[in-house]
Image: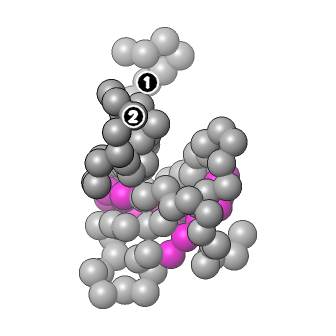
């Protein structure tokens, strides 16, 4: 267990940051920053989307297992610090898009 974690974890996010490349050589598909959110709890959790230092970027929703594939809610964009309602027992995938404009009001 990580210091400071107590009890059971019901929902967590994992950000894979493109800035942590082993070399400075850019490769297609390897320079994306993604955020994965897993909610194992039975209820909805308000998840605050993290920020990245010194950037003017936003998150784009790519996958939400609670939504159907043809919904207009996919590919919506969200500012850093906005909250997203993660439904119980679901998985979400966000991609960090540089210099994009948000499509969802704060």
Q: Does residue 66 lie above or below 14 as drawn?
A: below
Q: Position of residue 57 (x, y in %)?
A: 61, 57
| Residue under the point 62% across and 63% down | 99
Residue position for label 1 = 7
What residue is rendered at 53% in x and 16% in y? 4
Can the viewer see residue 19 in this picture?
Answer: yes
**With 62 as the anchor, is 51 left or right in this view?**
right
Residue sitting at 33 percent across and 27 percent down?
22
Q: How packed is label 2: few (under 14 Cα within 10 Å), some, or many (20 or more)?
A: few
State yes or no: discs 2 and 1 in contact (Cβ < 8 Å): no
| Image quarter in which the C terminus is found | bottom right
From the viewer's perspective, is residue 35 above or below residue 4?
Answer: below
Q: Which residues are magenta?
A: 76-93
Residue 57 part of the magenta-drawn span: no
From this view, report whether residue 44 is shown above or below residue 100: above
Q: Nearer the viewer, residue 26 or 43?
A: 26
Residue that mark 2 sits on? 24
Find out whether residue 83 is within the magenta segment. yes
Q: Secondary structure at mark 1?
A: loop
Residue in the foreground of this view, choosing between 3 and 89:
3
Q: Say which quarter of the image contains residue 75.
A: bottom left
Left or right: 80, with 97 as reference point: right
Q: Residues within 10 Å of mark 1 (few under 14, many from 20)?
A: few
Q: Quadrant of residue 91?
A: bottom left
Q: Quadrant of the N terminus?
A: top left
* CA gap, disc 2 and disc 1: 40 Å
Counting from the top left corner in percent of width and height, residue 34 is at 40, 50
Q: Describe the colour scheme in one phrase.
A: one colour
């Amino acid at each position: 267990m990580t210091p400071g974690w107590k009890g059971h974890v019901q929902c967590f996010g994992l950000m894979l940051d493109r800035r942590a490349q082993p070399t400075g050589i850019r490769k297609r598909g390897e320079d994306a920053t993604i955020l994965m959110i897993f909610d194992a709890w039975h209820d909805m959790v308000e998840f605050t989307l993290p920020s990245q230092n010194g950037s003017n970027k936003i998150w784009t929703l790519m996958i939400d297992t609670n939504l159907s594939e043809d919904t207009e809610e996919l590919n919506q964009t969200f500012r850093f610090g906005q909250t997203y309602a993660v439904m119980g027992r679901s998985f979400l995938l966000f991609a960090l898009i540089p210099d994009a404009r948000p499509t969802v009001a704060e």
